[in-house]
Image (cartoon, helix red, strand yellow):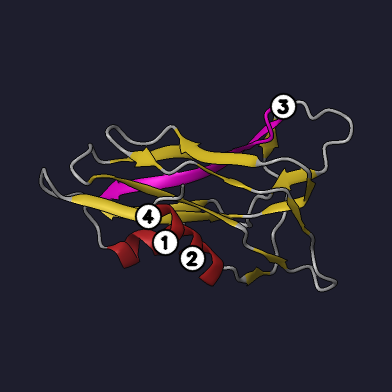
Amino acid sequence: MMSRITRSVLVLASALLVSLVGTSAVATAQTAPQGHTWHLEQFDRTSRMCVQQGPDGRTHASYFFFVVSGKWATDLEFGMRDLPPGWTATEHHLPPGSNLHDSDGSIRVNGFVGVQGPASVPLATYRAHIWVSDGTVTETLPTDIIVTTESWVDCMNRG
């Protein structure tokens, strides 16, 4: 039985499926066996989230979006690892299906990972990774969680 939160997340994901143009290289993968037909795509720029450091007790929550392209016949499990201390991420799956590039090169965003954690972690850029796995092959995509004292706008416009 699906919880109300899971249903809400799925509804939100459905509402946020948008086209992206200009995805580039495929993310890092373990050795892919012959017949591997899906890929976690790397955007032109590493995904990032800026968190203004705050006092204990304040939490920050957001989402990282990703694209799996190709075709797959089994569930693709996904989540996020290498998070800042005390942070958590949702884990879920994409059901069997496909997501192919349109003739103009665009493709639909078909996944997102929710993350949350304390804003009181040490100032740093944490290199986290979205992972997607079919049980045999796991591909990862780097993401940055930047805990800073600067404004969100200044942080997001850096680099």
Numbered badge on residue 136: 3
N-term-proximal mark, 2 vs 3: 2
**Circle 2 crowding by C-alpha within 10 Å: few under 14, some 14–19, many from 20:** few
As helix, strand or loop, the secondary structure at mark 3 comes to loop
Question: Mark 3 against mark 4, which lies toward the viewer?
Answer: 4
Which residue carries the number 4 mark? 5
In the visual, does 125 lie left or right of 131?
left
One can see residue 130 in this view: no
Tags 1 and 3 touching, CB below 8 Å: no
Which residue carries the number 1 mark? 8
N-term-proximal mark, 2 vs 4: 4
Which residue carries the number 2 mark? 11
Measuring from the top left, give residue 115's x and y in whole percent. 38, 47
Stretch of the chain drawn in magenta: 129-148
Question: Mark 2 against mark 3, which lies toward the viewer?
Answer: 2
Tell me the distance, in whole angstroms, between the alpha carbons under discs 2 and 1: 5 Å
**Circle 3 crowding by C-alpha within 10 Å: few under 14, some 14–19, many from 20:** few
Residue most extreme to the front: 1
Tags 4 and 1 touching, CB below 8 Å: yes
Residue closest to the eye, 150 or 131? 131
| Residue 135, quarter of the rendered image | top right
Measuring from the top left, give residue 19's x and y in whole percent. 65, 71
Tell me the distance, in whole angstroms, between the alpha carbons under discs 1 and 3: 30 Å
